[in-house]
Amino acid sequence: MKVFRLTCAHGHGFEGWFASSEEFDRQQAGGEIHCPVCDDRVVSRLPSAPYVNTGGRVAEPQTLPVVAKGGSVAPELATALAAIKAFVVANTEDVGRQFPEVARRIHYGEESQRGIRGRVTTEEAQELNEEGIEAVALPAGLALDEPLH
């Protein structure tokens, strides 16, 4: 599984998961990839550094804020994002960086079923996916610990 940082012609950053680089190229050529913010189909890959396990501290995942022209979130988008944040906070337990371990325990029946949220690295997300553990990445700009502007 390849994870690419993508951007549309309007500068909205987002992430895309593809089986291979060739699959990304095929979908891009076919107009299948679009921006989740503005639905623009002019999408390009951004440079990204590969993950290297040095055995040291795990870097915190980076988030890219979603902003409208002029540097602020459009009122309609701010309202929708606030509603999503409220729903996620009200219906999930924050397990922080313990997310991979707790998700596995729930998946394998070692803990009760419940909604959880937390943080994972790209590698951890890929490992969970390979194990058949469903987890949804929140879109850029929807960090639950950051206020909307």
Image (cartoon, helix red, strand yellow):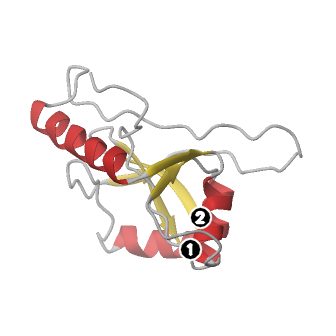
Q: CA distance from mark 1 to mark 2?
A: 7 Å
* Residue position marked by numbered label 1 in the rendering: 133
Residue 33, labelled with which disc? none
Q: Residue furthest left?
A: 76
Question: Residue 52: where, in percent of width, then height?
Answer: 80, 50
Name the secondary structure under disc 1: loop
* Residue position marked by numbered label 2 in the rendering: 103
- First in residue order: circle 1 vs circle 2: 2
Quarter the C terminus occupies? top left
Looking at the image, residue 50 lies above or below residue 133: above
Quarter the N terminus occupies? bottom right
Looking at the image, residue 40 lies above or below residue 27: above
Task: Identify which residue is drawn at 64% across, 37% down.
Answer: 60
Disc nearest the viewer among 1 and 2: 2
Question: Where is residue 36, by image quadrant?
Answer: bottom left
Question: Residue 84: where, in percent of width, then height?
Answer: 25, 47
Tell me if label 1 and label 2 are in contact, CB under 8 Å. yes
Badge 2 amino acid:
Ala
Badge 1 amino acid:
Ile
Q: Nearer the viewer, residue 126 or 43?
A: 126
